[in-house]
Image: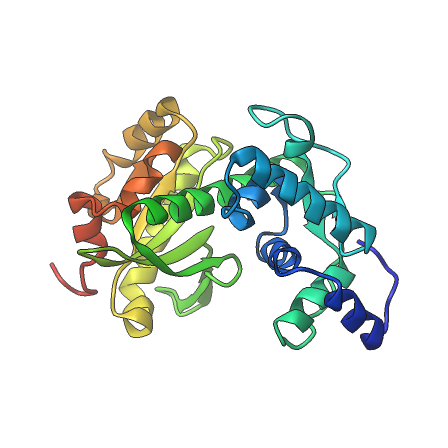
Amino acid sequence: MTSSRIGADRLIRILGNLSPSDVAVLRRLEQHRYLQTEQLARFEFTDRPTKLAALRAAHRSLKRLRQLGLILMLERSIGGINRGSSAAIWTITNTGLRASQTAASHGEQPRRRFAEPTLMFLRHELAVADLHLRLLEGASVVGATIHTMELEPLCWRRYVGQLGAMLTLKPDTSARIESARYDSAYFFEVDRSTEPPHRILAKCLQYQEYYRSGEEERRSGVLPLIIWVVPNEARREQLLRHLTPSNAVEQRLYRVLLPDEVPLVVADDDEIGALSNRKAGDD
C-alpha cells in the first residue's frame, strides 16, 4: 500500500479527473478488498454491448487508477478459467481509500496496513466476490432486488452466549433479497474445502446458539437461512454426511449449494424462499 500522503486539494483535483465508472471501481475495491479484472468488468461495466467491450473498459479504468496511485496490482495471480490480464488481482491503496471516501462524503477511516495476502486467503476473497456477482446477475434476470449485501466485518453479529460471554458470529456475507413472492434474509458461508467437516459442524451449532440468543429477532425479525456454498459435489456430499446424522443440527436452517445453484436464492425457489421468510420464533 502506498505510504505517500497527498493533500486535500490534490485529492479533489484527482477526483475531478475521474469518471463515474472510475469512482465505482474504487468503491467496489473498497468493499471487496481484492478483485480480478474480469470481476470488476462484471460488477461495473455491464452497460457495455459485449463481455470483451466490458473488459476493455475495465482495463482502461484500472490503468488510469493505477497511474494515479489509487490502486495497485498484486504480484501474484490466480490461474484457472480466467488467465492473462483478466485474471490480474487488484486492491485499493490508502490514497485510493481516501479518494473513495471523499467521493462518497464519508469521514476518513483508519489507514489499512498492506501485506501480500496468502493464496488461500485470496481464493476465498475472490470466491466471495463471485458469490456476490452470481446473486446480482441472478437478480437481474428474474427482476429481484438485493436491498442489502454486507461483507465482513459489517455482517458479523455480536451476541451473549449461553455462559454469558460476549461472542461474535462471523458469516462471510449477509443479504436481504426481495423477489416477486418473498422478502428473504440469508447468511452465506463460502467454503473452499479447506476446513475439516467438524469445524463446519461447529459453525452450524454457533449459528443455532446465536439464533437462540434472540439477537437476530430483535435486530431484524427474521431468521436468515444459512447457505453454504461449496466448490463441488464431492464436498457437498462430504458435508451432508457429517451434518445429517447430527441430532444437534437443525437442518431446516441450512442449505448446501454449488456455485451454479446460487441463483436459486433469488429465483423464487419455494423451498429456499419459504424457509428464509419464516419469522423468528415460528415453528
Give the percent coordinates (x, y) of residue 1: 79, 53
Give the percent coordinates (x, y) of residue 93: 75, 56
| Camera-side residue of 204 and 155 | 155
Can the viewer see residue 54 in this picture? yes
Q: Residue at x 30, y 54 (%)?
A: 144
> From the viewer's perspective, is residue 244 above or below residue 66?
above
| Camera-side residue of 204 and 232 | 232
Q: How is the image coloured?
A: rainbow
| Camera-side residue of 159 and 59 | 59
- The furthest residue to the right: 4
Can the viewer see residue 214 in this picture? no
Location of residue 85 by image quarter: top right
- 98 vs 245, left or right, is right
Give the percent coordinates (x, y) of residue 184: 26, 58
Location of residue 78 by image quarter: top right
Give the percent coordinates (x, y) of residue 115: 76, 48
Q: Residue at x 82, y 50 (%)?
A: 67
Q: Residue at x 49, y 41 (%)?
A: 130
